[in-house]
Amino acid sequence: MRVVWFLTVVALGLGLQSGFAQIPEQEKEALMDLFRGTNGLHWVRKWNPDTPVADWYGVTVEDGHVVALELFHNNLMGPLPETLGVLSELRILNLAFNNLTGQLPETVFNLKKLQVLKIEMNRLKGKIPETVGDMKDLKELSAFNNFLSGRIPARIGELGHLEILNLSSNMIYGRIPDGIGQNEKLEVLGLFDNQLFGDIPESIGKLTALRELVLSNNKLGGAIPESFENLASLEVLQLQHNDFDNYQNLGKINTRQLLVFDYDVEKADIDYRNLNFSRTRMADTKFDDVDNE
């Protein structure tokens, strides 16, 4: 009797383990669409469809669903499938530093539970839709060095948990939305090398957690906002190669904490001799990804 009971328990245990290892068929098919569509046979670390999905490189499965997909620097080539939107439990999507091309699927922005979206250093086209405002858990949106176009969505300010927004080196145009000031947890704002124009919104002064503000190589104009003096956490400030006509308010910034401070010195209409630049240095904008292969 004890032997039968023991075998029953073991069988149940194996059944539970097998159940936890399973994911819905549509999620597996979405992953296979990605594999086939991005030349999976030539990935650095390939997937074996005959093994459990939980064993595939870069895939994390919890409670029967794919919750993370991390394929950083893995030689993905080609377009992303629309079916990525099927992965409704996804919290991390890191496809940075690959050779992805084509349109960025808008279905990616239907992933309401996504916390990290990293697609930088690819060749993706398209726009960031207003539906990004529905991604309430998003903490990082890193998409620099692509061919993204369109405007910065007005609803970006609805992302109350956003800490990193880096859209540098794309073809994004228009004004910086005033709602950006609502992202009170924002620590990094990178909009370098786009086609942005108009004044910098005064609301940026509300971003008191901001450590990096990189706006260089655009067509921004008007005056430097007076509210910049509220950016007490700022360590990197890069404003060079824009069309500002008044730099006077830069004199109100506490420069002691600045490690990088770039502006168009020859255009500035203020005497900086009394400012403390002892810890600052001029530097080209560089983007370093901390992920490891």
Image (tube, helix red, strand yellow):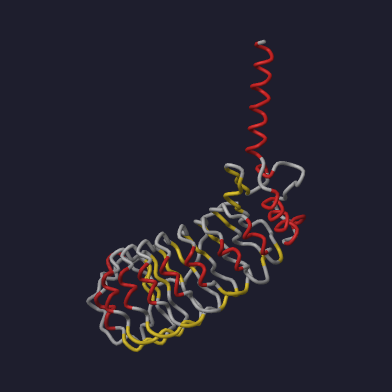
* Left or right relative to 196: residue 200: left
224 or 288: nearer the viewer: 224
Residue occupying image coordinates x 67% and y 31%: 15
264 to 6, vertically: above or below = below
Q: Percent position (x, y) of residue 147?
A: 60, 75
Q: Quadrant of residue 177?
A: bottom left
Could you say which is closer to the camera, residue 62 or residue 234? Answer: 62
- Spot the residue most to the top: 1
Whole-percent x, y for residue 214 in the image: 42, 72
Q: How many marks?
A: 0
**Up-down relation of residue 176 to residue 31 (above or below):** below
Lateral position of residue 81 relative to residue 114, left or right:
right
- Residue for point 71% across, 66% down: 78
- Residue 88, percent from left and from top: 58, 55
Q: Residue at x 55, y 75 (%)?
A: 170
Residue 11 screen position, x and y as percent:
68, 25
- Please identify the quadrant where the N terminus is shown: top right
Residue at 59% of width from left, 61% of height from top? 96
Q: Name, please, the residue furthest toward the left.
A: 274
Q: Outermost residue, bottom direction? A: 245
Picture quarter containing residue 149? bottom right
In which image quadrant can residue 86 be found? bottom right
